[in-house]
Image: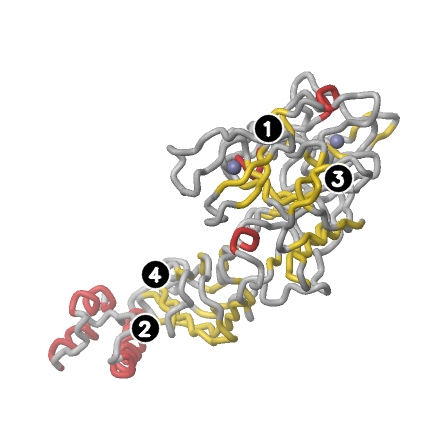
Amino acid sequence: MNNKLNSKSLIVCLSILLAYNSCKQLGLEKDEADNSTVAAAAILATRTTTATSTSTSTSTSTNTAPSALAYSGSPYSFTVNTAISAQTPTVTGTITSCTVSPALPTGLTLATATCSITGTPTVAQAATSYTVTATNSFGSTTATISITIAAVGASCTANTSTGTTVLASTATLDATTGCPTNITTCMDSALPAWIKDNFKCAIGYVSGSNYVFKSQNIPNTKSYYFTAYTNNVANTTYPLYEALPSGNTKAGSNTVISQNLTYTIPSTPTRGTGTDSTQGGLVSIGITLNGLAIFNNAAAPPDVLASEATTFDNFQGHPQNSGVYHHHAAVPKVCESAANTSNTGACANAALIGVALDGYAIYGQKCDNGTATTTDDFTPTLDSLHGHTAVTTHFSTATYHYHYANDTTATIYTLMGSFFYGNKGSVSN
Ligand SMILES: [Zn+2]
Ligand SMILES: [Zn+2]
């Protein structure tokens, strides 16, 4: 925009009561990222000062410049590829436009009407200062903020906290992270893309020849099992409580309880004998993309899993008697649309679901054929361990992986069969 005006224009501009609109029409509106910022600012300052004094004598007292612009969250620490919650400033008076200098980091946007900052940063940076200017026709006010953007998982180590312990009675969901409030997601930058770009609500990092995952194991969905019992009656007032699916019954007096699960999973899986049982008393045999325990295809004797499945919540999980929430079967939260808040989807697609303790990935019922398109997905022919060797979008070299599939022991579809294909890592709690 051209800021060069002749003196006559400027005088006309400053003399008119509705100075701002006239100046705007003449091209005096401050432009973003303009090389003539200094000159434009000088003209703007002259204009706004004069305009204020002119209008004060002829208008009501509400005609004042905005003031006291403030962002309570600054200094900000954001993370690459993590959407920020909207940062809306407080201000005295009315704002008609907002600008920022220098331009906000890539991926972040300033709302020109409210000065609210939103978006998802995509590039890491050290602390950088930005000046936000809020303007109306009578003047402007500024706020200086600081923004630091951390690389994804830059600081995920054995010391990284899984977050504040989450209690069933007060647990809520964080709409920004997609995880329970106060649960940390930190996937180290050294992890392969198929892990760091997909897993959340957990800590993940590389340790020697293993990947380590740490999880509190709190579902990022509503569940019947966010409850407590009094005389065997469930408390229905907890924020994330919801009723069981129609026809289902509760699993004893089990409830969701925060855990301290640590998985040590070989980063280069190796084929085992195929006779190492998944039913060997392990606390978990794998971890889902949303940081939850995977259990095997067995139920507590004498049940078969098919009968225990009647205690699943709306997301096909349930806790065992020490509060470890887990999935034996479909994980609709990670297979289906993220927009779904309650569903019983059957993972009848090629979605990545998690990783087993032996390091091999677990997918939905279909194989993606190594392409992102879904039109060529197919239902694979599997071995007795629910697996086969093929390319996927995550592995361009044909690699063994498991599928969610019909299980003859469970007599329902399960994530894993009775045995590991590979040499398993370890898990503790
Ligand atoms: Zn179970
Ligand atoms: Zn496959």
Residue 326 drawn above or below residue 35: above
Q: Residue at x 40, y 60 (%)?
A: 109
Residue bearing mark 3? 276
Q: Residue at x 64, y 63 (%)?
A: 156
Residue bearing mark 2? 52
Mark 1 or 3: the one toward you: 3
Q: Earlier in the sequence, mark 1 or mark 3?
A: 3
Mark 4 or 3: the one toward you: 3
Residue 96's disc is 4
Measured in 3D between alpha carbons, the distance from the residue under mark 2 to the one under mark 3, in whole angstroms, is 81 Å
Q: Earlier in the sequence, mark 1 or mark 4?
A: 4
Frontmost residue, 309 versus 175? 309
Three-letter code for the amino acid on which mark 3 is drawn: Asp
Q: Residue at x 81, y 32 (%)?
A: 254
Mark 3 and mark 2 in contact (Cβ < 8 Å)? no
Measured in 3D between alpha carbons, the distance from the residue under mark 4 to the one under mark 2, in whole angstroms, is 15 Å
Residue bearing mark 1? 405
Frontmost residue, 279 versus 389? 389
Mark 3 and mark 4 in contact (Cβ < 8 Å)? no
Mark 2 or 3: the one toward you: 3
Three-letter code for the amino acid on which mark 1 is drawn: Ala
**Residue 112 spot, x, y in % from top left:** 35, 60
